[in-house]
Image (spheres, grey):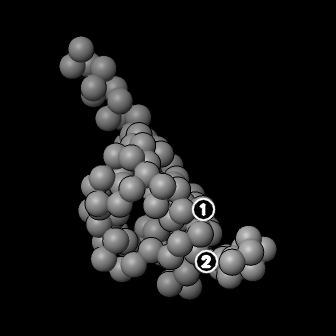
C-alpha cells in the first residue's frame, strides 16, 4: 500500500486522541515502553497510537486509563461530551501538572 493512500485514512480524531494519550503519558513521566508494557503492546505500537496511525481498541483504552490513572473521559472528553469546554481541559491539564510536580517533590524529599 502506498504511503499517501494510508495517510489519507488517518482521522483527525485518531490523531487528537493519540496526542492526548501522549500528553497524559508525559505528564505522568512515563516512557512509551513503560506504558506499552502496562497494556501489553510494543514500543512501536505505542508510537503508532500516539501519532494516530492506529486506532485504539476499547479494551486497550481502558488499559491505558488504568495505567495512567485517568478516566476515559480525560482522553475522549472533547469528542464525547459537548459540554467539555477547552477551559475545562486546560484546567484539568494544570491539575495533572501540579499533581506531577507534587509527586516529584515527594520523591525528592525521600532522598
Q: Which of the two discs, 2 and 1, labels the residue nearer the N terminus?
A: 2
> For the residue carrying disc 1, how many other residues have a C-alpha within 10 Å: few (<14), some (14-19), or many (20+)?
some
Which residue is rendered at x = 34% and y = 26% of the image?
105
Which residue is rendered at x = 51% and y = 65% of the image?
49
Q: Which mark is residue 51?
A: 1
Quadrant in which the N terminus is drawn: bottom right
Residue 22 drawn above or below residue 81:
above
Residue 109 appearing in the image? yes
Nearer to us in this view, 111 or 29: 29
Q: Which mark is residue 13?
A: 2
Residue 88 appearing in the image? no
Give the residue furthest to the right.
4
Q: Mark 2 and mark 1: span between their CA atoms? A: 11 Å
Q: Position of residue 93 (x, y in %)?
A: 50, 54
Give the residue furthest to the left.
110
Which residue is rendered at x = 27% and y = 55% of the image?
38
Q: Which mark is residue 30?
A: none
Give the foreground label among 2 and 1. 1
**Secondary structure type for disc 2:** helix
> For the residue carrying disc 2, how many other residues have a C-alpha within 10 Å: few (<14), some (14-19), or many (20+)?
some
Which residue is rendered at x = 35% and y = 60% of the image?
41
Residue 110 drawn above or below residue 69:
above
Q: Position of residue 20 (x, y in %)?
A: 53, 62
Quadrant in which the C terminus is drawn: top left
Amino acid at each position: 500500500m502506498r504511503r499517501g493512500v494510508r495517510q489519507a485514512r488517518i482521522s483527525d480524531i485518531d490523531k487528537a486522541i493519540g496526542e492526548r494519550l501522549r500528553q497524559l503519558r508525559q505528564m505522568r513521566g512515563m516512557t512509551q515502553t513503560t506504558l506499552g508494557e502496562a497494556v501489553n503492546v510494543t514500543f512501536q505500537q505505542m508510537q503508532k497510537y500516539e501519532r494516530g496511525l492506529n486506532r485504539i481498541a476499547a479494551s486497550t483504552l481502558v488499559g491505558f486509563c488504568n495505567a495512567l490513572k485517568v478516566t476515559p473521559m480525560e482522553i475522549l472528553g472533547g469528542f464525547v461530551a459537548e459540554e467539555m469546554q477547552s477551559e475545562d481541559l486546560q484546567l484539568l491539564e494544570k491539575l495533572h501538572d501540579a499533581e506531577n510536580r507534587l509527586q516529584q517533590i515527594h520523591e525528592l524529599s525521600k532522598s
